[in-house]
Amino acid sequence: MVPAIRGLLAALFFTAMISAASAKDDKTLVVGTITTPTVNNAVGSGTAPGTPGTQVFAGLVELDDHFVPQPYLATSWDVSPDKLTYTFHLRPGARFHDGTPITSEDVAFSVDTVRANHPFGRSMFGPVDRVETPDPQTAVFVLKQPHPALLASVTTLLLPILPKHVYANGPIRTNPANTMAIGSGPFKVAEFKAGQSITLERNPDFFLPGKPKSDRIILRFFDDMQAARLSLENGETDAMLQTSFGYGDFDRLKKNPKLEVFTDTFAGLGIVDYLEFNLRKAPFNDIRVRRAIAHAIDRKFLVEKFQGGVTKQLEGPLPPDSPFATKDLTHYAYDLKEANRILDEAGYKRDADGIRFKATLDAPTFSPDGLGRVADYLKPQLKKIGIEIDRRISPDTATWAKRVSNYDYDIAMSQIYNYPDPVIGTHRLFLCKNQIKGVMYTNTGGYCNPKVDEILDQAARETDFEKRKALYARFQKIITDDLPYIYTTTELPYGVVSKDVVGRPRTALGTMAPMLEMEKK
Amino acid sequence: MTVRSQGPQSPLAEAWAIFRRNRPALLGLALLVLIVAMTLVGPTLYGVDPLDIVSAPLLPPGDADAPLGTDYLGRDLLAGIISGGRASLAVGLSAALLTMGLGVTVGALAGFYGGWIDRLLMRTTEFFQVLPPLILAMTIVLLFRPSLATVAVSIGLVSWPTPARLTRAEFLRIRELDYVRAARAMGARNRRIIWRLILPNAAPPLIVAATLTIGAAILFEGGLSFLGLGDSNAVSWGLIMGMNRPYIFEAWWATTFPGIVLFATVLAVSLIGDGLNDALNPRQRER
């Protein structure tokens, strides 16, 4: 061979190699999320396990951005006329990452696992009497009572289909496959670096052909939101689909020409912020005290001055854009005079320093502008009505959760995800029997109104939308009368994605959705 | 008319004369007096409650309601800085007292008695020295509740090894000096030797160390509060900075102004410490 040609070939080969290598690197997406000890979202709720879980596992259906169920692992489903039997037809040929076919046995096992282990497994699958498995492709959910929230519950986020042969061995919470998870979702876990990142690799045998688009996604953990924001700004991280950055950063990030900032994928989360009271203790068990406090909070100020006008003022348990929200609530206008009058009339006298009584106030560290800053605001604000607040600092969210869930608090700032259906996210805070000491996001305040229990029980089995809506309207009205919680604002997270990235998930569940189309341009 | 410079000077007067010649130290003293005066009478003169929400949050300096602007809740920053000095200085002072009290006691016992007491106390000191002070202090604060008292105690508990080492070294040196041996020969009790003979002669470096400890403790409190581990019910400079830290890109003033005051205070204390070092160290008197 002529040396010149050999040289040229070598050069070409070399260039090709380099460009291949860099192209591969460019295809790796780095996505920020919060630290999680587990990938298995069958045994934990929230965005931490929800983000990797929805990549690695697949559920029977996925909700689109209008909460409408779309086929996913189930290609279709039939509902019996009495609405007591749901028959799901599994996708033929779908396999787990280890090559085992997915069968209806796995579906039945997953329902049992979630019901027993997930924080709201009971409200989602308590009404399911049994899952029948007439053949490997068919799973029949037989219900004890009509269950309007069933289809919203069989999504990847809430019912990841687990391979029975992997997760049925021993206690599920200590299963090693909770980190090196085996599912049937678009991505496989290639590496789990505790406290740092999860490397996901494309599942070549994924049941939707041509998806996912990305070969490799690194889910990078961030606990410090400042660090996450800087990482997005300097381009080390390509996307963070749900942030809890302050609202002050919202405008600044929007001005960044390299980044897209969005708020359109969170409607299904229904995040609300509120004060909760330890109703086991005086004087917080006195409705007049809670009414006075409700009058002392200027929600307009919170939304406009603290949250950049991005959130909405909130008076009842459901966010205003929920299909079940009502405007017929008992309102507590911002009125310090009225608040003082109520407390005077109730006999809470001011001492020489103008103090009627003292109360501790706890707030978690997530949601700095929604919860922490509002808690700081309440201290001077409640002093104006003679309540001296001792603002207890929690070093982390776990400390706050431990105090509240063990009833070691007076007043706390809290936040809850209502999810697409109130049965899933809302009921847990109000049912008398859902007081489970030590478990956060249950009825930690100790509220109990048999009438509310009855309404919620009816709403959980009512399949007619309008009738259901009327039941929830009554519920919301009673809650604003009883005032076990004082609602402040909605919380609207926002996502940040580099403009080099296309195809971010269009979903209603924020970061907890499969990244099927997302890739670098 | 008395001619002071002719007569024999008391050691204190002599030290003051040397201190006075040290311009930076005098500047530090003036600065500290100013800052202490501000925190003591300031709140009465500038009658705005530092915890009260007076206006919109994060207003820039120069506002009619808030000359230095407002913080993230809409509180007057100037009022916060004026009142915050009390907590910062109080914690700094009490933490320094605790540090010196613990350190001098441990160091004196170890240096004077030697033997197994020395070994036991020094191993304990080393144990504290190998732990990173900030992490240890954070742990102590979190074990109890963050409050001014726990913050002061935690600073004291992590800072005492340095003065303990210093005191021990001085005691080891002085206990072998002739006048101590003489006193011992004359039958003086240990307590008298420690209190009347060794401690006064070991005092100069300890006073300097104590001064510098105040500065370090103020800074330490600032650091703990900045990390969100201060007493959120008592305004301090570090707390103001810590609470406004997330908003630093929107409102530089809310972290910068308390930072400047904190910096000035620690600088003043350090300058005074340097001046005292010169004034109390006999070897440097010839300068």
Image (cartoon, rainbow, N blue to C red):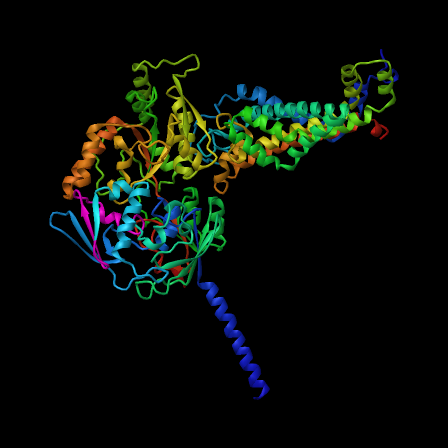
Q: Is residue A519 left or right of residue B212?
A: left
Residue A64 visible in the picture:
no
Residue A498 magenta: no
Question: Which quarter of the figure is the C terminus of chain B placed in?
Answer: top right
Quadrant in which residue B237 is drawn:
top right
Residue drawn at the location 33% of the way across and 47% of the way down: A42
Q: Nearer the viewer, residue A273 or A102?
A: A102
Q: Nearer the viewer, residue A438 or B134?
A: A438
- Would you place residue A290 above or below residue A476 in this image? above
Residue A135 magenta: yes
Residue B148 visible in the picture:
yes
Q: From this viewpoint, which residue is outermost toward the bottom?
A: A1
Q: Nearer the viewer, residue A250 or B124?
A: B124
Question: Which quarter of the figure is the N terminus of chain B placed in?
Answer: top right
Quadrant in which residue A445 is drawn:
top left
Residue B244: x percent and y percent? 49, 36
Residue drawn at the location 81% of the way across and 27% of the way down: B173
Q: From this viewpoint, which residue is outermost toward the top?
A: B1
Chain part drawn in magenta: A133-158
Q: Is residue A2 left or right of residue A114?
A: right
Residue A258: x percent and y percent? 44, 56
Residue B164: x percent and y percent? 71, 28
